[in-house]
Image: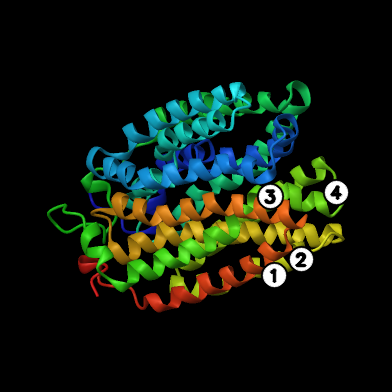
Amino acid sequence: MTRATGARSEFRLGAKPLAAALIGVACGASPLPFNVLPLVMGPISAEFHWDFAATSAGVTVFGIIAALLAPFYGGLSDRFGVRPVVLWSLLAFAAVFASFYFLPASKTGYLLFWAVLGAIGIGSTPVTWSRAISLWFNRHRGLALGIMLLGTSLAAMVVPQIAQAAISRGGWRMAFPVVALLPLLIAIPIALLWFREPRVDERPAGIADTTGAIFGISLRDAVRGHRFWILFTSILLTAFAYGGAHIHIAQIVGLHGFSAEVAASVLGVVAVGILVGRLLVGFLFDRFWAPGVAFPALLLPAIACWLLMGTDAGMSHVIVGGFLLGFAAGTESDVIAYLAAKYFGMAHYGRIYGVLYMPFAIGSAISPIIYGMVRDRTGGYDPMLIAAMVMFAAGGALLPLLGRYPDPRTSGND
């Protein structure tokens, strides 16, 4: 069979795996906790008499544990393939997330639940799925990864509504087992039917040499170069700015005088922003130099932070702010997945992506507790939003320093 080289061939061969990956990302550990916690944070704080920093600490522990294990799961995907890793991780994630119905009033027990979720859920995130999609697509990898990462947008549009309905009928605890049905009943069956990595003869040109050996450098070689650390730092700054803003967006909206239902709708607007960012940025990555596209895209959420400051913003400011925050999230995830492949190749993509996922996960994990501390001490979020404006701008400004793309046969070597 002739290798696929055109867009039509790439999408014809990879359509089903891409669709399965999109659904798998939507139902995995990357979006679900972050779309449920904003809605249960207030009720948990009220029932357990905890401040917002303590309530936010759960997702902080979740993110740190997931970050530390991301290179391990990425390495498993490199060695054994993506399919077994994502299937088992989705199953375990569904079981543990459903068990959050039994969250205890003990802070130690609360954090333990989140730690276990991070340890077993990371295999269901883009850390694993993106390796397979990057092997199916080369010429249109940016668009394909953008489509795959739309899973988080899909989750952000649907999950808050499902969770809010469950909360309205059965209290905040009911949100967890209801949302946990998504990976169990939707993602796993579709992945079993459609998801796999391409055979050697199905890979697009530019992925491997004539013998089938995949291009790329090792993690050890990648971390010796300046490009890796530029990307690492950019991801950390952007994730730290965005993570807390997303988790606390319902509280930020509430401070402007809007109801919980409006806050849930703004989460949907964030999802639309993520969707637009994913597709538009991915499309542009395939046609232009990606760092040059990402830089201005990451300046937009700085405007969002300004719009969301204070306590008297109108509905239009809140909606635009939510959209631009989502756009930043869409851009950042595309940056990690696309640039990791472009600058370091696919031979050890899972492990390299896993290490680059660490600043994303750690920044996203620590950020909510800092936002919560600022809220507890000042009664609002303005100081943190000002800091986030600076971090978004700095994270974007670093990316042009990556320079031109390297030869795929020697990706990442300086």
Q: CB atoms at circles 4 and 1 under 8 Å apart?
A: no
| Image x and y of residue 384, in percent | 66, 62
| Image x and y of residue 87, in percent | 39, 30
Q: CA distance from mark 2 to mark 3?
A: 15 Å
Q: CA distance from mark 1 to mark 2?
A: 6 Å
The amino acid type of the residue labelled 2 equals: Leu
Q: Residue at x 41, y 53 (%)?
A: 357
For marks 2 and 3, the one nearer the N-term is 3
| Image x and y of residue 277, in percent | 58, 60
Q: Which of the pair 66/175 is nearer the observer?
A: 66
The nearer-to-camera label among 3 and 4 is: 3
For marks 3 and 4, the one nearer the N-term is 3
The nearer-to-camera label among 3 and 1 is: 3
Q: Residue at x 43, y 59 (%)?
A: 336
Q: CA distance from mark 3 to mark 1?
A: 17 Å
- Counting every numbered tag in the picture gives 4
Q: Residue at x 32, y 45 (%)?
A: 74
* Pointer 4 residue: 258
Counting other residues with Cα less than 10 Å from the Cα at mark 2, is it few (<14), some (14-19), or many (20 or more)? Answer: many
* Pointer 1 residue: 303
The nearer-to-camera label among 2 and 3 is: 3
Mark linked to residue 248: 3
For marks 4 and 1, the one nearer the N-term is 4
The amino acid type of the residue labelled 4 equals: Phe
User: Is residue 223 shown left or right of residue 127?
Assistant: left
For marks 3 and 1, the one nearer the N-term is 3
